Amino acid sequence: EAQVTQNPRYLITVTGKKLTVTCSQNMNHEYMSWYRQDPGLGLRQIYYSMNVEVTDKGDVPEGYKVSRKEKRNFPLILESPSPNQTSLYFCASSYRTGNTIYFGEGSWLTVV
Amino acid sequence: QKEVEQNSGPLSVPEGAIASLNCTYSDRGSQSFFWYRQYSGKSPELIMFIYSNGDKEDGRFTAQLNKASQYVSLLIRDSQPSDSATYLCAVKTGSSASKIIFGSGTRLSIRP
């Protein structure tokens, strides 16, 4: 089954404690990205990757890091989480940039 | 001006009626247009995409594109309670970076 899998789905953490949200897709897609969704603000892109070892900032990259060492994986790293990073996070992939986007199930992150 | 604008709603429509959702975009060079449906707490899922001016029908859904006026709409015929969700308009920009920009979504409520 074609899917985008992200983990953890739910996480409560404390300010400053590094965390990683993993993302994996099994569709051999070149393009992967991370979004956060907040009430009234819609989906905002954090980082994206057009292929292995190629990443770039989206609209709200501050406080986040990513890496793309393999085509299927695109982890999101919060080096020092802060409460304003409390949000619903989606990993997504598509065959190429601008093609139909497939989303993971989302990760609810709370930073206290 | 936001790049992709939608009325946040909520839009309330009686069951069995036609729901009409609208979206405007600012980049005149935009190429592809997508409608995603998102149930509360779930990930967005693609309903339709449209590339050319005019109408595109898929079951109870019709997407309409007018590039001269820079708007795209989604009509849902015979609305059902299960159609109650947030509908996200997404636009592939015409820039060389060619990214997909999401609107903040319209919340649709179908009343029995």
Image (cartoon, rainbow, N blue to C red):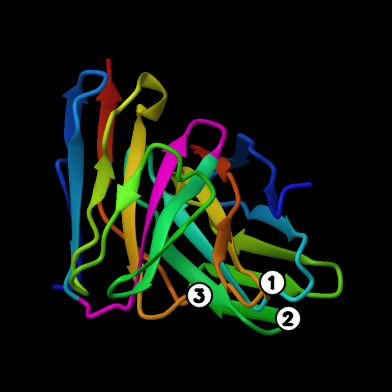
| Residue at the image point whose x is 28% and y is 29% from the top | A80
| Residue at the image point whose x is 58% and y is 59% from the top | B101
The chain under label 2 reads: B
Residue A33: image location, x then y, percent: 37, 60
Determine whether label 2 and label 3 are within 8 Å by CB. no
Residue A74: image location, x then y, percent: 24, 60
User: Residue beneath label 1, please?
Assistant: B64
Same chain letter for marks 1 and 2: yes
Of circles 3 and 1, which is in front? 3
Closer to the camera in the image, B43 or A32: A32
Residue A20: image location, x then y, percent: 19, 42
Above or below residue B30? Residue B19 is: above
CA–CA distance in space, label 1 to label 2: 6 Å
User: Residue beneath label 2, please?
Assistant: B54
In which image quadrant can residue A69 be found? bottom left
CA–CA distance in space, label 3 to label 1: 19 Å
Q: Which mark is residue A98?
A: 3
Tag 2: Cα neighbours inside 10 Å, few (<14), some, or many (≥20)?
A: few
Q: What's the residue type where badge 3 is placed?
A: Gly
| Residue at the image point whose x is 33% and y is 67% from the top | A93
Q: What's the residue type where badge 1 is placed?
A: Gln
Closer to the camera in the image, B61 or B53: B53
Q: Which mark is residue B85?
A: none
CA–CA distance in space, label 2 to label 3: 20 Å
Above or below residue A91? Residue A7 is: above
Query: Which residue range is magenta in the image?
Result: A27-41
Determine whether label 3 and label 1 are within 8 Å by CB. no
